[in-house]
Amino acid sequence: MFYPSDVPVPEVLRTDEFLLRPLRATDVQLDYDAVISSRPELLRSSGGTWPREGFTLEEDLADLERHEQEHRERVAFTYTVMNLTETECLGCLYMNPLERILGHDPESGAYLSDSTAYVSFWVRSTRLADHLDRRVLSALVHWFLNEWAFSHVLFFTQKSDDRQIMLFEEMGLRLLYSMRPHQPFLAYLVELPLVRTKLE
């Protein structure tokens, strides 16, 4: 299990601008609109793999059903970013076990545990100009520091995503390591209380 069974999973993060809550299959229309409207940025952040050209509402529904099931089973957590009236999807947040992306990479051995999360997020492209991604990241860092029981939280981004790299560095997240060439990611560490901050 990704998250301790005896620890409640935080359900909501609310600011005066947006709401994060668990993604549900019933969000498919709003989610699909955000995905399609942001496809160029999502393709860039996914390394050109998602969403594919011709991505359908039915495919998005299947993704949402999988995310909802994983959330219930506590093996991964996916949150939608909504406006306060929940009439527009503003983005999405994904939390997964670190080993899902790294396997057993010896360079990351110090951080591989059941309570290590790797995190990625996006906001819809129409909200990049007003820097919503910066405000979402700021809220997320405080949320992880105060509400979650992970031992480590690593934000992952593509090496080519200059915007997110700049955001992470502005927020004081520390670059932990760069993945090997066949996995073009950078990992940024949120400095949680009492966690080890250097690889041995």
Image: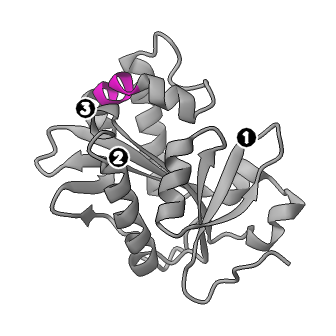
Residue 145 screen position, x and y as percent: 45, 78
Say which quarter of the image contains residue 194: bottom right
At 43% from the left edge and 24% from the top edge, which residue is drawn? 39
Quadrant into which the C terminus falls? bottom right
> Hey, what amino acid is under mark 1?
Pro
Colour scheme shown: one colour
Answer above or below: position of 64 versus 18: above
Residue 93 screen position, x and y as percent: 43, 50
At 16% from the left edge and 45% from the top edge, which residue is drawn? 86
Crowding near pointer 3: few (<14 within 10 Å), some, many (20+)? some
Name the residue tied to disc 1: 184
Answer above or below: position of 153 versus 180: below
- What is the CA distance from the residue labelled 3 to the residue labelled 1? 30 Å
Q: Are marks 3 and 2 in contact (CB under 8 Å)?
A: no
Q: Which residues are magenta?
A: 32-38
> Hey, what amino acid is under mark 2?
Leu
Label 1 or label 2, whichever comes before in sequence order? 2
At 19% from the left edge and 37% from the top edge, which residue is drawn? 88
> Hey, what amino acid is under mark 3?
Leu
Crowding near pointer 2: few (<14 within 10 Å), some, many (20+)? many
Name the residue tied to disc 2: 23
Crowding near pointer 1: few (<14 within 10 Å), some, many (20+)? some
Q: Any mark on residue 30, and which?
A: 3
Label 3 or label 1, whichever comes before in sequence order? 3
Q: Main secondary structure of the magenta part?
A: helix
